[in-house]
Image (spheres, rainbow, N blue to C red):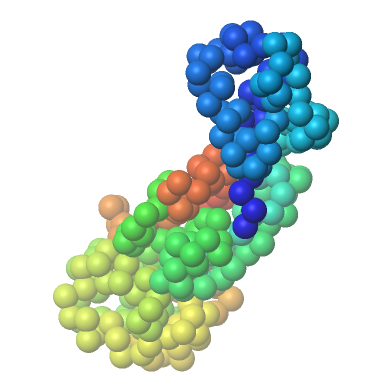
Amino acid sequence: MTPLPTLRQLQFFMALVRRKSFSKAAEECLVSQSTLSSAIKEMEALLDRQLVDRSTRAFALTPAGEDVAARAPAILAASEDMVRAAGERRPLEGEFHLGVIPTIAPFLLPQLTTRLQEAYPSLTLYLREDLTASLADRLAAGLIDAALLALPYSLPGTDVIEIGEDPFWFACNHDHPYARRKSLKKQDLEGCELLLLEDGHCLREHAIDACALADHSRASSFDGTSLFTLAQMARSGLGATLLPAMAVKEGLAEVSGLVAVPFTKPAPSRRVGVAWRRGSGRNEEAAAIAAVAAEALSAKG
C-alpha cells in the first residue's frame, strides 16, 4: 500500500502556498510555526521530494511543490464534500442489513417494512432470517448492521434498545381441558404436556424461564422447528403449546384451528429489542429502526 500524505498536511501546505510565509500560514491554521514546518517536512520525506525552495529569501516552490499545489485543491475539495455529505446524510438512507429471528420475522416484518418504506423512502433494506446465535455471529463479523431479537440473550460488544414485551399465550386444540378457560395462571402449566421449539431457538428457553416450568421434560416431548409446525402438532392433539402474542395477533392460532388463551397479569413474556455493534456508527440508524419496530409491535395490541 502506497504511503499517502494526510489531509492535515495538505491543508498546511496549501495554507503555505496561499500565504507564502510559514508564520502567516501557521497563524491561518491556528498552529505553531514549528508544527506547520514539521508537517511540511514530514510530507516531503514521505514523497521523497522537496516541495519548498529554501535556497532563496523569497518564498518559492520547487517543481514538485508546484505539481502538488496544482493537485491538492481537488483532493481537499473532494474530502470536504465527503465530510459534508456524511454530515448531512439522514438516517437510513442507502443500504441497511437487518437480521430477524424466525419467531419474529413473519409476524412483525410485514408492518415493520411497510412503515420503514413510508418513513425512509431512500432506504434499501436487506433482510436476513436466522437463529439468534447465527445472527449474533453475523453482527459481530459486520455482515449485518443490526438484528431484531428476543431478549434476554448475551450479546457481548453490542448495544441494545428494547422495543417492548411480547406476552405468551397458551394454545391448544378444542378438546383440551383448558380450551374453555378465559385465562390461565402460570401454575396451571404444571403437569401440562407442552410442545416447544427445538434447542437453538431462544423462544424455547424464554418460554421455559418466563413460565417457570420446573419439569423441562414435560416441555420437550416434541421438538418443533417452527411455530407453524408446533401449531399443527397441537391441533393434532399431541399437546398444547405456547405462542408469542404477535403470532396470535397475526392469526396463527386461528388459522391452525387452535384456541388461544391469555395468561393473567403479569403474563409470562419475552422482551423484543434491536441490537447493533458497539462502535459501528449505526447508533442513530438502529434507534430509528427500533422506534419504527416499537410502533409496529404496539399496533398489535
Percent coordinates x, y for residue 272 in the rendering: 43, 55
**Most distant residue in the left direction:** 214
Whether residue 8 appears in this view of the structure is no
In which image quadrant can residue 271 be found? bottom left
Relative placement, left or right, of 121 versus 294 is right
Query: Who's the residue at 32% across and 67% down the image?
Result: 206
**x and y percent of residue 157 in the render?**
37, 54
Horizontal and vertical percent for residue 264?
Answer: 30, 57
Name the residue: 27% across, 64% down. 210
Q: How many marks?
A: 0
Q: Nearer the viewer, residue 63 or 276?
A: 63
Which quadrant of the view contains residue 75?
top right
Compared with 45, 192 (above or below) is below
Q: Quadrant of the N terminus?
A: bottom right
**Left or right, 22 with reference to 18:** left
As rendered, which of 70 and 151 lies closer to the eye? 70
Image vertical order of residue 249 relative to residue 224, above or below: above
State whether residue 133 appears in this view. Answer: yes
- Across and down, in percent, residue 230 comes to 45, 83
Q: In the rendered view, tell whether residue 65 sits above or below residue 209.
A: above
Name which residue lies at 56% across and 64% down. Answer: 143
Measuring 52% from the left and 56% from the top, which residue is drawn there? 146
Q: Given the current orientation, which residue lies at the most extreme front position? A: 55
Left or right side of 89 for 27: left
Horizontal side of 212 relative to 160 (left or right) equals left
